Image: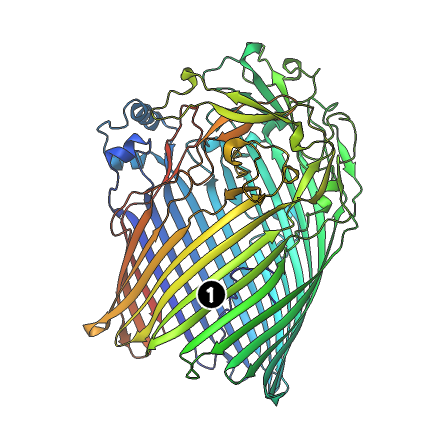
Amino acid sequence: DEVKLGGVGINFVTRNGTDRFRGSGRLYITDEAFQADNLTDEVKLGGVGGGAPIQNIKDYGFEVGGPIMRGKLWYWGSYSKQDIKAGIPGFFLPDANCQAMKAALRLDPLAPIPTDDVRGCLGTDGTELNNYNWKIQWAPVQGNKFSFQNTWAEKFKNARDASDTRPIETTFRQRAVPSEFGKYGWDVGPSPLWKAGDQHIFSDRLLLDVQWAHLGNNFVLDFHEDDLANVQPTFIISTGVWGRSFQRSGPFIRPTHSVDVTTSYFLPSFGGGDHALKLGYRWRTAKEHSEAHVGGNTVARFASPTVNCTLASQNCQGDLYRDSNVNYELKTHALYAQDTYSLGRTTFTLGVRWDQQDNVAEASAVPGHPFAPDWLPAVAFDGADAGVVWNDISPRLGVTYDLMGTGKTVVKASYALYYGQRSPNQVVNTLNPVTAVQIRFPWTDLNGDSLVTRNELNLGVRPTVVQGNYDPDNPTSLRSAGTVDPDVKNDRTREFIAGFDHEVMANLAVGASYIYRKYDRFTWDDKVGLTSANYVERTFTPTAASCPAAGARCETVTFFEPNIPVPGAFVFTNVPERYRDYNGVELSLNKRYSNRWMGLVSFAYNDAADHWDSPNSFEDPTCRAGSGTAVNTTCLPSQTYAPESGGSGIDNIFNNAEWMFKAQGMYTLPWDINVAGFFQSRQGYPFPQAVRIASRANQGGLVDVLLEPLGDTRHPTLNYADFKVEKAFTFGTTRIIPSLDIFNIGNVNTVLARRRLQAAANANQISGIVAPRVLRFGVRINW
């Protein structure tokens, strides 16, 4: 009941020092020199001649702990580093030789160029992870233990989001936020965690645990080079390819403070059974500061790579952006109680949880657009409170029953109600006028320099696209165009689980579970005065010239566009008559270690679907899939609303893979050599092929129209296996364990992702593939 959200929860507990000096270390090396070639002609024809190679991975670290004062005071500390370098599929280095190779492979993907040469021209996706920990424990009196811990987590990426559609100048540098934005080591710098706790055992029945924590969570996704901040990006509408520059996302500074008080009381032989009672309280505050800036505050949009924007007839576009600069604070309280009641063969778990969540937007300001301040003026915001406080009560009930009274066959069932965890910006973000704003105008590149200037935009019309808390009918307004429904409710998950576990023989058990979840009370920004009845049906057939890629699907598609200008005003509220459900079955066979071997086999199948029960549950009926990271999987079968038999409305498959099989095991050979293996088979993820409609009337904006319901076409099934061998050597109290791992032992080359836009030059090109077989050498030391 201390868990607020549904799903799997993981509680990490770091090591502690003891009265003996102990420690361990590790070193793992993976290098391209020990890597196979998994590229076939079929894969090369998909435009990914170099594959997805590992270049070099180093993973090393150590941890030590021991006594400062035996029986009273202990220390523990650790350091680890992961240095990961991988080649990026389709991402060629900018030097002349590599660009010539890229051009040659475009003309003939089967050109006789050695795979190693192509890999040598691929850009590097570099990631560095550094983690530092130290911890002190003190036992001042009998039954009491105090601990204090400090952790630093640092992540750096040199070219985040690099791909064949995001060249190097459009990638992000990910790093910690510098000290100019806050107090280093507290809110900024490598994300710091400060944590203190005290545990006191009053008796064999009563335990009290108090914890305080501060997490300075922060990062920034910066321009690849600082001087790109004033450079306008380019965007090719048909292919989704960016160029010249991109944007800065952040800094994101999200510190949290929390206090947790938990007490456990054990009450045996009361009311006919034994009770384990738990009562807890949590107080937490979370702040959020974030900023965003698009290069030059402007994006030049081209219909295709060859379009001539000097002609007004080519329908080029200029996007104007106003920066965002927001501050929010969330305050939460939670109280929970639970009783685990054991009565004969039956154990009941009864619990209830109360959560209160409230947040506010704090003052901030942004400058106006550099050359269109009349459309995007500077804004100073004094802050706001939506007045919406969520008080949610979540009951929990579980029961297990020992079917035979032997402890070998147990049936179980549980019901739980979960509510969403409010983010610092949720609800109140609607009232904030200094969030990012995007507006779009027709653009004619009069001087042919590919840069958008004021005199080249048609500013005499209403913007063709509007994103953000902005009223296009009143552009000089310094207020948000959004309001909040005072009765908006928190999203909700209802969960039911039933299953059994049976011990077939000593150390061998089977299990089965059925899981049902229903998700509802989703929220949306409901446009005032706009409903699905305001959308009219249109058709579009791509021209043959726009479908040069072999195998591209360019059939006629149906889409919808509004018959009135899309209103700027909106209300943050719950989506009516919409829900999502999940039905899943999980089967497992678990062999605990005995007779020199162990193993685990599992199979999971699930069916998840979105439901729209009436036209009130959506505005835009178009079967669509959004671009970039804003993927909208709203796909209405037959591209229009038509209630199913029985009036249950519209369904849409939601899940990624409907089934997954896993098997893993270990066997100890003579001379205590351990060999282990892992195998996974899963259904391929959906391949949502779509045709892009560059613009729609009445500010309907761009839309990617799916050619079929999501999930009808999928990537291939993934079958993947790993192998490991290790042997421990003991020298006194020291153990040295060298090991060898073989990843992708079958050297499969399963395609994981393709470019989905069909009326484009890069249609169906492979953008993700399984890395080839590679060896990893490692050694662990324990003392």
Q: How many marks?
A: 1
Q: Residue at x 29, y 23 (%)?
A: 104
| Quarter in which the N terminus is drawn | bottom right
The furthest residue to the front? 646
For the residue pair 768 and 659, the one nearer the viewer reads as: 659
Residue 209, quarter of the rendered image: bottom right
Counting from the top left corner in percent of width and height, residue 508 is at 33, 74
Residue 87 versus residue 619: which sits nearer the camera?
A: 619
Regarding mark 1 in the picture, which secondary structure is present there? Answer: strand
Residue found at the far left of this picture: 670
**Rendering coords of residue 117 (x, y %):** 26, 34
What residue is rendered at 73% in x and 46% in y?
428
57 shown above or below 267? above
307 relative position to 423: left or right: left
Pick the residue in front: 553 or 611: 611
**Would you call the spot at circle 1 few (<14 residues within 10 Å), some (14-19), or many (20 or more)?**
many
In the rendered view, does 72 fall on the left or right side of 428? left
Residue designated by label 1: 78
Q: Amino acid at mark 1?
A: Ser
Instruction: Tell me if I can see residue 308 in this picture.
Output: yes
Relative horizontal placement of residue 57, taking residue 378 as reference (left or right) = left
Q: How is the image coloured?
A: rainbow
Classify 334 as above or below 713. Answer: below
Residue 447: in sight, yes or no? no
Q: Is residue 271 above or below residue 757?
A: below
On the image, the x and y values in percent for residue 658 come to 42, 50
Say which residue appears at 49% left-offset and 66% top-offset.
Answer: 498
Of the pair 339 and 117, the residue shown nearer to us? 339
Quadrant position of the C terminus in the picture:
bottom left
**Which residue is at a point 54% across and 17% down the rendered structure image?**
450
Q: Position of residue 248 (x, y in %)?
A: 58, 37
